[in-house]
Image (cartoon, coloured by chain):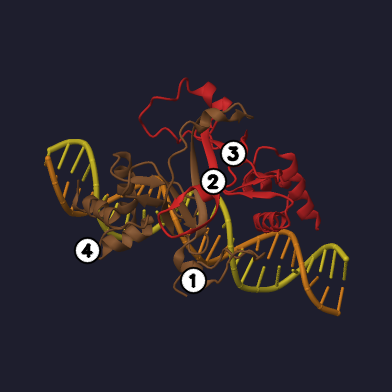
Chain colours: A red, B brown, C orange, D yellow
Amino acid sequence: MTRQRSQILEEVRSNRNHPTADQIYEGVRRKMPNISMATVYRNLEILAEQGLIQKLETQGKSRRYDYNTFRHYHVRCIGCDEVGDVLFHPLDGIESKLEDASGYEILGHSLEFIGVCPRCRDKKPTATGSKGKNQSTNDPTN
Amino acid sequence: MTRQRSQILEEVRSNRNHPTADQIYEGVRRKMPNISMATVYRNLEILAEQGLIQKLETQGKSRRYDYNTFRHYHVRCIGCDEVGDVLFHPLDGIESKLEDASGYEILGHSLEFIGVCPRCRDKKPTATGSKGKNQSTNDPTN
DNA sequence: CTAACTGCAAAAGCTTTGCTTTTCA
DNA sequence: TGAAAAGCAAAGCTTTTGCAGTTAG
């Protein structure tokens, strides 16, 4: 456990917003200005393997990491791509309920909710009902 | 509707394997050797906007496209990343059943199953039960 | 002392964009 | 003829990798 690795772990644990590798990098860089992105990626991988953090496979462009290693679901904002937690008990056993149209052996599932975060809801009054491709407003600080 | 666009549409409709942009590109290239990747991407976007095909946001590295525009779920092979259909009636209304831990306005969900496709199952006898990170065998033709 | 790890830079994938030329209604 | 689209090349972003120097047990 090197200084870098424990700083990275600390950063993930203190950032409760499901940070991306880049956000973690920026956070750690405030304390270790010379750390490199490669070190961040490599350590996130190792920490996830060790079960100290959770690697999230969400649908945004960037992977995200979670201090919370319990199985739970997330909601992603279509406006700013931020990710939040939802309280919903895992759909255990759902795999056995489906008919297999393809011959696959089903091992598990991943469920992600889509929504609008509080900040983005305040920006765009009733985002619902538009027809354009309105998912590109990526900066909630506008 | 240019020649290119209709060839791309035709390719998606004839390839029932949820092809990636690259696979579509290769398919169309057999008939139009000069078509470019940019044209493929731009047209897939347009065709999806028009509702003629469906853009799938799966978790693999590449986006996929589906001739079937009805809402349905998919299963992705952890071995080769191929995507198949599963027969499972959509979880409509699931959004209202969850407690919101984050203040998000929930709009929808996306559900993806993880599994092993028939070809990969034949390659690795009982893939279940291993402890390593065994997801990297990406070529089912080995 | 040896194995693991860091930092840097470069590369790898996938997707998008700028620009000029071509096509089509 | 004018708007939309094609083709090419380059750039953008995220993530991974090779390598030489450094660190830690």
Q: Left or right? Give the position of A9 relative to B53.
A: right
Q: Residues within 10 Å of mark 4 (few under 14, many from 20)?
A: few
Q: Earlier in the sequence, mark 1 or mark 4?
A: 4
Q: Left or right? Give the position of B99 relative to B63.
A: right
| Of the pair D25 and B106, the residue shown nearer to us | B106
Residue marked by disc 3: A74
Mark closer to the observer (4, 3): 3
- Gap in Å between the C-alphas at discs 1 and 4? 34 Å
Q: Earlier in the sequence, mark 3 or mark 2?
A: 3
Mark closer to the observer (4, 2): 2
Subunit ID for the residue under disc 1: B
Q: Quadrant of residue A92?
A: top right
- Gap in Å between the C-alphas at discs 4 and 3? 43 Å
Q: Residue at horizontal 22%, vertical 63%?
A: B31
- Whether B70 is drawn above or below B18: the answer is above
Q: Quadrant of residue A20?
A: top right
Residue A45 numbered tag: none
Mark closer to the observer (3, 2): 2
Q: Secondary structure at mark 3?
A: strand
Mark closer to the observer (1, 2): 2
Q: Quadrant of residue D7?
A: bottom left
